[in-house]
Image (cartoon, grey):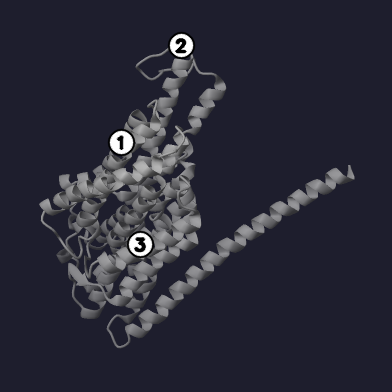
């Protein structure tokens, strides 16, 4: 009895100790983030000495840093999460790799000029004066950052682009009325809530089904791998070449429409010629098992995660520094401009903030995307990464405003639901009731198998993420408008 009581007490003490360590790590991250924002305060104060509206510049720098931290905590998970879930990368390795390539993308391909009115959704000429414009942009930046922070806390990967778009629209409406917003553009953005995840999911599921049919379900899996894996890697190389030209490098070079197609085609041919003998040599002697096939996808998946991180840094740093650059330029010049240059310190705030947010708070969302929605292996994760690049290319060619976050997470759901479908068919066959159609009822499945099928895609994460996506723009818009009116009442 004494030993039993002592064991329970020790177990309780261990739980308390683990919880204490968790709180300590959490508070450490918040403390480091606070120090980072304090450094931005000091730097902005020093660089804005003698300028008009110095207070605006300092406050905008701190809010922009807060936004960058939240982008790093939430959005970067979509690029490296599948590789971590597939165990191609450790969590620490993914953090380091993402930090390097995100920063490289921001600095080398982030561009030196950004549009200050995100996605052209508002007319800058309709603002009454510069101070009203600055307050609207400040409200948009703070509202978007707060919404992403909340989404990260509940474990929902959301679109930072949609967050800032909603913030800009809400702040602009509060400042200049409903007529200031381009509602046609807003409608296209709303349509992307459905288009992005559906396209990502369908393309990822199609690639996974093709791999299963051409390689995994073949009697000689190794022969199928030698034949088709070079093709799949070549598709990835061609897709990412076009992706980087169209999206990742668009701020420093805008090629003619045929250039990405030509470069992508050339990279496909070159990669296929190089990879075919390499895959053949590596596959020699491998066992005819699914595990052997997965081993061949580890390196391509790591390369895909690195390229996605580079493109994300090149594109999404503008979500943090675009409104910040607008505020700094307007506060310094006293005029509203639709395009402004990015000061070096502003670019540093964006790049450093994203990297720091990734290290301090990113692991939670990386785990959500990587292994909590559905179980990923290198083959499934590869399909997710490839889908992200191809979907963005297809959407850009069609002029559709899609979200990379929605695409990547939709692709994860796509491969998960395909697994559910395949599992259901196998269960039907095993019960001697084969049908070309998926089962409409689960009466043919034992309870244990029905529970196993449910686990393939966790519905709790599905509904949480979908709900967060649907309310991102309206919530950030309402929050931005409320912040704007509060600031006007207090400070003006």
Circle 3 crowding by C-alpha within 10 Å: few under 14, some 14–19, many from 20: many
Of residues 211 and 457, the one nearer the viewer is 211
Secondary structure under tag 2 reads loop
Q: Earlier in the sequence, mark 3 or mark 1?
A: 3
Please give the name of the residue rendered at 35% of the width and 67% of the height, measured from the top-left corner.
Answer: 351
Q: Is residue 314 visible?
A: yes
Circle 2 crowding by C-alpha within 10 Å: few under 14, some 14–19, many from 20: few
- The extreme bottom residue here reads 50
CA separation, marks 3 and 1? 34 Å
Please give the name of the residue rendered at 37% of the width and 82% of the height, measured from the top-left corner.
Answer: 45
* Quarter of image, res 114: bottom left
Circle 1 crowding by C-alpha within 10 Å: few under 14, some 14–19, many from 20: some
Secondary structure under tag 1 reads helix
Would you say 175 lies left or right of 153 here? left
CB under 8 Å between callouts 3 and 2? no
Q: Earlier in the sequence, mark 3 or mark 2?
A: 3
Please give the name of the residue rendered at 28% of the width and 63% of the height, measured from the top-left corner.
Answer: 318
CA separation, marks 3 and 2? 52 Å
Secondary structure under tag 3 reads helix
Please give the name of the residue rendered at 75% of the width and 49% of the height, measured from the top-left corner.
Answer: 11
CA separation, marks 2 and 1? 34 Å
- Disc 2 vs disc 1: which is toward the camera? 1
Residue linked to disc 1: 227
The quadrant the N terminus occupies is: top right
Residue linked to disc 3: 102
Image location of residue 266, percent across then percent down: 18, 50
Image location of residue 474, percent across then percent down: 32, 50
Residue linked to disc 2: 432
Q: Is residue 410 visible?
A: no
């Amino acid at each position: 009895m004494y030993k039993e009581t002592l064991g329970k007490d020790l177990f309780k003490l261990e739980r308390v100790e683990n919880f204490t360590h968790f709180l300590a790590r959490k508070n450490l991250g918040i403390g480091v983030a606070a120090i980072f924002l304090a450094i931005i305060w000091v730097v902005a104060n020093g660089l804005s000495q003698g300028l008009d509206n110095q207070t605006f510049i300092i406050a905008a720098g701190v809010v922009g840093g807060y936004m960058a931290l939240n982008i790093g905590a939430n959005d970067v998970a979509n690029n490296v999460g599948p590789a971590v879930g597939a165990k191609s990368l450790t969590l620490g390795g993914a953090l380091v790799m993402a930090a390097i390539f995100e920063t490289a993308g921001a600095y080398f391909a982030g561009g030196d000029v950004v549009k200050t009115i995100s996605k052209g959704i508002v007319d800058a000429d309709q603002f009454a004066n510069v101070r009203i414009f600055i307050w609207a942009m400040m409200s948009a930046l703070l509202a978007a950052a707060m919404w992403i922070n909340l989404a990260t806390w509940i474990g929902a990967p959301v679109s930072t682009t949609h967050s800032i778009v909603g913030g800009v629209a809400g702040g602009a409406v509060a400042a200049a009325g409903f007529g200031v917003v381009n509602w046609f553009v807003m409608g296209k953005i709303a349509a992307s809530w459905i288009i992005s995840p559906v396209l990502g999911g369908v393309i990822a599921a199609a690639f996974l089904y093709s791999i299963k049919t051409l390689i995994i379900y073949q009697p000689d899996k190794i022969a199928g791998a030698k034949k088709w894996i070079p093709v799949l890697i070549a598709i990835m190389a061609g897709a990412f070449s076009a992706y980087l030209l169209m999206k990742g490098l668009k701020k420093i070079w805008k090629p003619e429409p045929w250039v990405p197609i030509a470069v992508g085609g050339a990279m496909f041919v070159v990669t296929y010629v190089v990879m075919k003998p390499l895959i053949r040599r590596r596959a020699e002697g491998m066992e005819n098992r699914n595990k052997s096939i997965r081993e061949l996808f580890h390196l391509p998946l790591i390369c895909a995660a690195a390229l996605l991180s580079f493109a994300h840094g090149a594109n999404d740093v503008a979500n943090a520094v675009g409104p910040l650059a607008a505020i700094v330029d307007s506060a310094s010049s006293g005029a509203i401009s639709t395009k402004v240059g990015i000061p070096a310190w502003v670019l540093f705030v964006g790049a450093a903030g994203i990297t720091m947010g990734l290290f301090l708070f990113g692991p939670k969302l990386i785990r959500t995307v990587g292994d909590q929605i559905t179980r990923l292996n290198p083959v499934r994760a590869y399909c997710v990464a490839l889908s992200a690049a191809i979907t963005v290319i297809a959407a850009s060619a069609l002029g559709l405003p899609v979200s990379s976050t929605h695409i990547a997470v939709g692709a994860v759901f796509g491969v998960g639901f395909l697994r559910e479908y395949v599992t259901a068919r196998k269960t039907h066959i095993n019960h001697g009731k084969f049908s070309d159609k998926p089962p409409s009822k689960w009466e043919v499945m034992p309870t244990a198998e029905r529970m196993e099928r449910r686990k393939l895609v966790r519905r709790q994460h599905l509904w949480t993420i979908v709900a967060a996506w649907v309310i991102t723009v309206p919530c950030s818009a309402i929050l931005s408008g409320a912040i704007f009116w509060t600031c006007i009442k207090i400070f003006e």
